[in-house]
Amino acid sequence: ATVPSCSQTSTLAVVLEILEKEQCDRLVVVNQQQSPIGLLYSARLIPELLTAASGETFLNLPVALLLLKDLSQQWSMRS
């Protein structure tokens, strides 16, 4: 099965579209080399959406700002 993913530069608006389309609650975030760098859970977005001063501005932010855990260091150490 294919795991839903998005680029670290994808906007949160794009992420929300993917979550809805794929009917999932989490995405793997990948870097330019398509290596996983973190996970993004939909539950993590809810408080951010509720407290965002400007929803439109928030939706244009890159998803890398909201990663649950940045795995880039771990992956680079394994290479």
Image: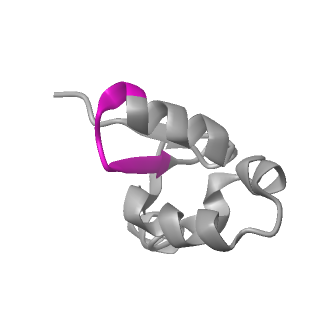
| Left-right relation of 28 to 64 | left
Q: Looking at this view, name the residue that lies furthest to the left.
A: 1
Quadrant of the rendered image containing residue 79:
bottom left
Q: Nearer the viewer, residue 75 or 51?
A: 51
**What stretch of residues is rendered in magenta?**
21-29
Question: Residue 47 in the image: x percent, y percent?
Answer: 53, 72
| Left-right relation of 13 to 34 | right
- Can residue 22 be seen? yes
Quadrant of the rendered image containing residue 63:
bottom right
Question: Residue 19 in the image: x percent, y percent?
Answer: 41, 38
| Left-right relation of 47 to 28 | right
Numbered-mark total? 0
Please check the rendered image and state whether residue 1 is part of the magenta-colored stretch, yes or no: no
Question: Residue 33 in the image: x percent, y percent?
Answer: 56, 40
How was the colour assigned to the protein in this rendering?
one colour
Q: Nearer the viewer, residue 4 or 50?
A: 50
Image point 45% across, 71% down: which residue?
Answer: 68
Vertical order, 7 against 26 (above or below): above
Image point 24% across, 28% down: which residue?
Answer: 2
Vertical order, 13 against 74 (above or below): above
Question: Residue 1 in the image: x percent, y percent?
Answer: 16, 28
